[in-house]
Amino acid sequence: MALLLIVWSGTGLAAAATVDKITVTISAAEPPPDRIAKRMTTSVTTVGEQMLLGRTVGDVETNKASYEKLVREIFDRVLVGYTVDQVNILPGSTTHISVAVVPWGDVVQSVSLEIDLSGLSPDLVKLIKKDMGKVEDQVANVLIGLPVDSVEWAGGVSKAVIRELLAAELPEFRSNLEITAGQHTNIKLSLVPAGPVIDNVQLSLRSRTIPNILLAEASPPVREAAGMLRGLPVAFVERHKDYFSAEISQAAARHPAASKYGITLTPVIHTGTETQITLNAETVKYRVTLEGNLDMGHQDDNTSAKLHIGKFTGNRDEVFFEVKFLPDNLTWKFDPGWGHKFTENTMAGIRYNFSDKESTLWLNQYVGSNWTIRFEHMPKSEFNEFGVRYKLHDFLSAEYVITEKENWLRLVANL
């Protein structure tokens, strides 16, 4: 009696076995692209789960033909461009569904990707296409071999492929896509900036060795090159800062003054909706500066003009001659001198004033791009002068001068 009960219980358990999992295989004479096959598999899996999960294995075995017919009918409606040739269901706790499909009509033989980058320079177009990598090849792998009639629903997969690639390679843009299906399928892609864009570009030309008047001559081509940044995403320009720095440098280097005076051009780009570009222009051959001074709070010789002409004799040494004109008493001062560059921002030396027959030891310390600290000492008269200068504009600076007897504010025109 106990043995019969055990046998009966086991039989009951076997009869109650249910379908817990669905697996799917898609086959075709010409296999569809991997992403499309994956989408087909997902669709059939969804249909199979809705029909079979939770049903008894016995029920599936008994009604196998009906279930196979139902899968065929549903998939024939969903999968435009293909005909379902055969469906086979292998019942079990893990039930397997095999579907064989046959494409009908024309198939896609080639794919072209047309990118709308109107308004951008050819060089920028090349840069963006380089960032995009092999998007066209990836999309072709999705669509070539598909029935033309199936491109419409497969287009969603193609768009997903493009957007995934662009999100990784060109994250600063969003993409809009338009697919025209045919044996030669055309895809039009337009890019729209994502995030803040550059609205304006401010250009500043700075130099410690060249008069601003000469730099002003090179300004137009540099401004034109800097104009390419307008309308671009801030993050895109930040990521390609080296590229844009090189483009601006090359534009400035094409000016005749660059080769004539041996000018080295180093742009510094501070990205933002209001992008700031500082072009540092220096020469290893000469140092020529011209400035006019107006002192406020100082009575004697409170206006002056000074011309500095120097020649570098090595990487760090400079011999120079300074001419200073004092309009108040119409006098001229002539100071030859020598300077040594200890670091890129520290320079010191000596000069001799023929009129006063006195030497001056001097030190200039540059702090950042706008600040300069100056110290001068005259051993003969024991006179010391200390100055802190701030560049207000490319052509104007303000300096606070401190001596043992008085202090005053000096405006300096950097000509």
Image (cartoon, grey):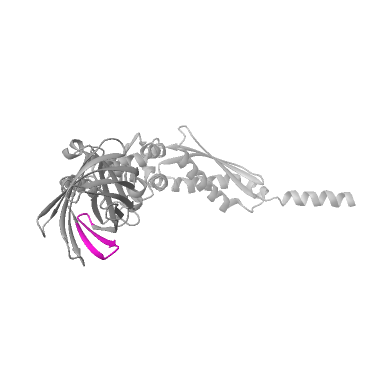
Judge whether 357 appears above or below 148 on screen: below
The overriding secondary structure of the stretch rendered in magenta is strand
The answer to whether residue 223 is seen in the rendering is yes
Determine the residue located farthest toward the right in the rendered image: 1
Whether residue 266 appears in magenta in the rendering, the answer is no
* Span colored in magenta: 393-412
Residue beneath the point at 36% across and 38% down: 136
- Tell me which residue sits at (17%, 63%) in the image: 300
In front of the other: 123 or 59: 123
Query: Percent position (x, y) of residue 277?
Result: 27, 51
Q: Nearer the viewer, residue 102 or 412?
A: 412
Using the image, determine if residue 147 lies above or below residue 404. Answer: above
The mark tally for this picture is: 0
Is 260 placed left or right of 172 in the picture?
left
Q: Position of residue 223 (x, y in %)?
A: 20, 48
Residue, x 24% and y 52% (percent of image)?
204
In the rendered image, residue 400, in percent from the top left (x then y), is placed at: 27, 62
Q: Residue furthest top?
A: 29
Left or right of 338, for residue 299: left
Relative to 333, is 36 on the left or the right? right
Q: Residue furthest bottom?
A: 297
Q: From this viewpoint, is residue 122 visible?
A: no
**Dividing the picture into quarters, in which one does residue 165 lie?**
top left
